Image (cartoon, rainbow, N blue to C red):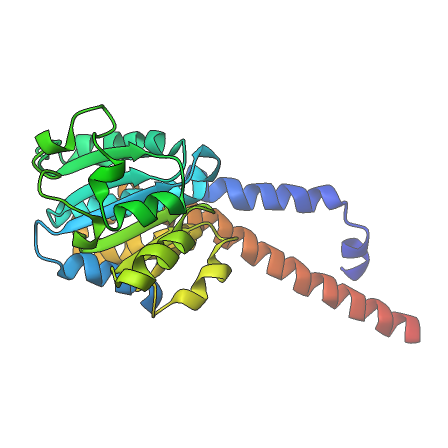
């Protein structure tokens, strides 16, 4: 058996990895997840806020990071809609409005058609300047945003008519792929003004943001894993959302899990072959 494994064509390993990724996708297999405290804190805050609370959702990413961040954007928006919060969409990235439009079409217009634009949610769109935008709107929103993404005056929109600045928000949640994003919201909104802030980010960015938890950030969703944990918490609280179509993060975690298990198995197997070879050479 050792001889056979020593001479095994590496293409069989490539095939095994291909199947490890493909089969969970084809069969839409999901595995149980449980929200860790850093994710559960975000869920609990949105869950505990009374209906009509103001949630600022900042889409600070573009299509290049959509694979990691779209599932958490979907889950957060769905939860806010379930709790009947007022959602204020904003973007610090130029292509952020496109991601906002996609999420609104995917969640609000499809599953919550009763929600009305201007009364239940509003899209403020993109303004250039990143941290400069935050520094202005934290004290005077209408100094930078005189109209929404479609050009309607904020004074004519019920949700924004009485808003002076983002200190009136009950929660800021940034979905971030880099700068400007979560770090800037922490530096210029959460830390100096004490506005409750949380976020979701790509996997490569997460280690840089964990030090802000739990003082400046009340929670953080890290990549697909964080999205899957949030979906699990949502499905536990609202069982009707346990169906696969509502759990893109959980479905995307499955190929990763199976592939990682295969990699660990191959590492163990490779080390076993190595020590068997050493034992044989000593003899």
- Can residue 247 be spotted in the picture? no
Q: Residue at x 40, y 48 (%)?
A: 181
- Can residue 67 be spotted in the picture? yes
Q: Quadrant of residue 217?
A: bottom left
Q: Could you tell whether 78 is left or right of 67 in the image? A: left
Label tally: 0
Q: For the view shown, which residue lies furthest in the top direction?
A: 151
Q: Could you tell whether 61 is left or right of 34 in the image? A: right
On the image, the x and y values in percent for residue 272 come to 73, 67
Please say if 109 is above or below 251.
above
On the image, the x and y values in percent for residue 42 come to 27, 60
Q: Could you tell whether 262 is left or right of 29 in the image? A: right
Q: Quadrant of residue 243?
A: top left
Please say if 42 is above or below 283.
above
Pick the front one: 276 or 224: 224
Please say if 275 is above or below 270.
below
Image quarter where the N terminus lies is bottom right
Q: Residue at x 9, y 29 (%)?
A: 156
Q: Quadrant of residue 145?
A: top left
Pick the front one: 21 or 16: 21
Image quarter where the C terminus lies is bottom right
Q: Residue at x 22, y 55 (%)?
A: 171
On the image, the x and y values in percent for residue 195 come to 25, 59
On the image, the x and y values in percent for residue 194 come to 26, 63
Q: Could you tell whether 60 is left or right of 47 in the image? A: right
Q: Residue at x 7, y 52 (%)?
A: 51
């Amino acid at each position: 058996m050792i001889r056979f494994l020593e001479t095994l064509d590496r293409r069989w390993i490539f095939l095994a990895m291909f199947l490890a990724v493909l089969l969970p996708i084809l069969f839409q297999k999901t595995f149980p997840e449980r929200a860790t405290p850093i994710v559960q804190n975000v869920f609990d805050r949105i869950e505990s806020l009374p209906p009509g609370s103001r949630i600022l959702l900042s889409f600070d990413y573009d299509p290049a990071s959509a694979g990691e961040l779209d599932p958490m954007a979907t889950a957060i928006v769905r939860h806010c809609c379930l709790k009947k919060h007022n959602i204020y969409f904003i973007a610090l990235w130029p292509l952020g409005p496109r991601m906002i439009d996609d999420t609104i079409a995917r969640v609000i217009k499809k599953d919550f058609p009763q929600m009305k634009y201007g009364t239940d949610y509003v899209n403020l769109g993109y303004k250039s300047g990143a941290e400069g935008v935050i520094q202005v709107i934290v004290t005077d929103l209408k100094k930078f945003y005189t109209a929404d993404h479609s050009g309607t005056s904020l004074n004519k929109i019920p949700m924004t008519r009485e808003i002076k600045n983002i200190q009136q928000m009950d929660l800021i949640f940034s979905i971030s792929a880099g700068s400007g994003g979560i770090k800037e919201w922490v530096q210029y909104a959460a830390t100096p003004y004490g506005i409750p802030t949380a976020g979701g980010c790509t996997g490569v960015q997460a280690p840089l943001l964990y030090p802000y938890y739990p003082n400046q950030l009340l929670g953080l969703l890290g990549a697909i894993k964080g999205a899957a944990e949030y979906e699990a918490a949502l499905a536990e609280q609202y069982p009707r959302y346990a169906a696969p179509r509502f759990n893109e993060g959980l479905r995307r975690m499955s190929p990763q899990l199976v592939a990682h298990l295969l990699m660990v198995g191959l590492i163990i197997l490779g080390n076993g072959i190595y020590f068997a070879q050493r034992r044989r050479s000593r003899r």
